[in-house]
Amino acid sequence: MDPLILLDVVVFFAFVITVIAVGIGKSRGEADSEDYFLAGRGLSWWLIGFSLIAANISSEQFIGMSGQAAMHVGLAIASYEWMAAITLVVVAFFFLPKFLRAGIYTIPEFLEYRFNHAARSLMSLLMVAVCVLVSFTAVTYSGALTAEVLFGDQEMWGGWQITVLNASWIIGLLAAVYVVAGGLKACAWADLIQGSALVIGGGIVTYLAFQALGSADPQTIGLAAETTATSSLDRFRELNSHKLHMVLPRADLILPWTALVVGLWIPNFYYWGLNQYITQRTLGAHSLADGQKGVVFAAALKLIIPFIIVVPGIIAFNLYAGEMQQGAAKENQAVLDQLATAQADPQGAQIAFEFNENFADLYPDAAAQMLTVNRAVLQGEPPAEEGETGPAAQNAALLKQIKSENQQRTAEEQVAIQPAVVGYKFDSAFPLLMRHLVHPGIRGFVVAALFGAVISSLAAILNAASTIFTMDIYRQYLNTKASQSNLVAVGRLCVVLFAVTGCVIAPQLNRPEFKGIFTFIQEFQGFFSPGVLAVFLFGLFVHRAPRMCGVIGLLLNPPIYAFLKWGWIGLGYSEIAFLDRMAITFGIELLVLAALTLIWPLPTPVTLPEQTKIKLEGSSGAKVWGVVVVLATLALYAVFF
């Protein structure tokens, strides 16, 4: 192994081992389920704040969000962070008091008190499935991808090389170690270190990215040789003026401006207010005041996250577009091999091809060949739609017609649409910055900070999934008389089983059809998050909503969202952006639940339980800082709108 790479590895493992040791050391003596799952309800505000950020910010953001920023989305993707700041303030003062007053272990537990047992069980199953199959697998994969990009060409001991497959197992099992050992308190103390290192590490990468942009040859990064933009900031503005705004066109499939009105608020309120692996930190608060101060502290930290994740992603494309193109070409090869076969007999092959605008710009000949094959498969030309001038738009019209006709065909007759080929591998943006710009030793620290954040997120997910399974499924159905030690043992066993399951699935996400890891996570959350949010809004604030609303609201979401995702296209209509699909689903849910409430209102509001263990006095200081955070967020939107 290269001595410099060895230095990075030593720094990395020293950091990770220290973090795990601190977490386990601080959690010694955890004896019962409340200690293990909720840190004995004794977390202070500063622990909660850093823990929320460390559990949230991981490779999902550093890989997925910076990758979206490298695309046409640019700074607009920062809305996920800045709107989250406002969301957190609302959660602190409208959601959290109700949850802490009820003394719940899990978010689904609230549904039993407000609606019925069936609603709690249904949401528990949904949340365990999503935690393991979506959240854990996505974060594991993106962390493993970072490791492969950074060190994949380096031979380790005995010629061993890092791949997405083996890195997934290393990352996933490391996360499982300290969750098994110490539960939520171990996670929170580890998060304190990792959250701090995360901000420092991201700041280092941002600084080095601006330095590299300022010293790069102008023509290499796409500037004219005689450019007057000499400073890093001037170059950044000149190269990326089309990306430095918060509003994208209505037709954009990732973040249309309409999503800022409704759609983006849905995943934000679900994630920060109702997602167990985030809210578990606040449920473990020492008091309501601590919980509110911790959440507002996290909201303030969210305002700086785009400057250490989104901005570097934009710069990465300026510096390394060529390497992103090479990465995409490697992944496209299998589809291009299919194209060569299909050209010989397009109708007999019964396959069609999908490509984006970047691919068409970089490889016009291959795009033209795909168009020819798709026309032959369709045996005709669909009617042109307004604005369809480029090859990608023309092909989208062809594919829409092919998908519509597939609805009428048997399984054997259907045209197989190949995974989309793309021009650039945008998800490699942040790893490329670390690989090229961060020096050995320091790189070990930055990588450790990033992977520490990955492991923090995975630990939070595992802890949440095991808590829900143990308290909402095992204790409710499998062993109603389980002892405290038995509950803790089951929770630890769940951590191991869930980690193994996620590590098996994670490498499968390395496929272009998922359209980037950030989109994958958000897209699949649409199958349940609008319904969950609608049900909780009625449960928390509509006191006469009938008990049937819980189950009905949760069951309605998947079919409505699925129809908008697939059925709508099958009817011949254009694809709807996933955030707009969430908004439509959420609107339908609200109408249905409102109708049920009007027809069958509860005669008297439900009386919720009240715990007496923690103090429920709010924090006036947190309210003041909450207002400051909201005003600062609005100011950022005004500057970059």
Image (tube, grey):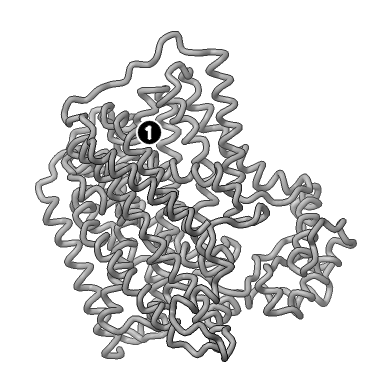
Q: Is residue 507 above or below residue 541?
A: below
Residue farthest to the top? 603
Residue at horizontal 45 percent and vertical 52 percent from the top:
133
Q: Is residue 117 visible?
A: yes
Q: Is residue 350 above or below residue 235?
A: above
- The image shows residue 85 at horizontal and vertical percentages of 38, 48
Q: Is residue 359 left or right of residue 501?
A: right
Q: Is residue 446 left or right of residue 344?
A: left
Residue at horizontal 43 percent and vertical 83 percent from the top:
214
Q: Quadrant of the N terminus?
A: bottom left
Question: Which quadrant of the view contains residue 126?
Answer: top left
Question: Which quadrant of the view contains residue 108?
Answer: top left
**Residue at image mark 1:** 108
Camera-side residue of 340 and 262 = 262
Q: Is residue 461 left or right of residue 617?
A: right
- The image shows residue 601 at horizontal and vertical percentages of 50, 13
- The image shows residue 500 at horizontal and vertical percentages of 36, 57
Q: Is residue 566 left or right of residue 195?
A: right
- The image shows residue 433 at horizontal and vertical percentages of 41, 77
Q: Residues within 10 Å of mark 1 (few under 14, many from 20)?
A: many
Camera-side residue of 583 and 371 = 583
Camera-side residue of 307 and 577 = 307
Q: Is residue 208 above or below residue 96?
A: below
At numbered mark 1, what does the secondary structure look like: helix, strand or loop? helix
Residue at horizontal 19 percent and vertical 37 percent from the top:
34
* Count of numbered badges drawn on the protein: 1
The amino acid sitting under disc 1 is Pro
Q: Is residue 474 visible?
A: no
Residue farthest to the left? 29
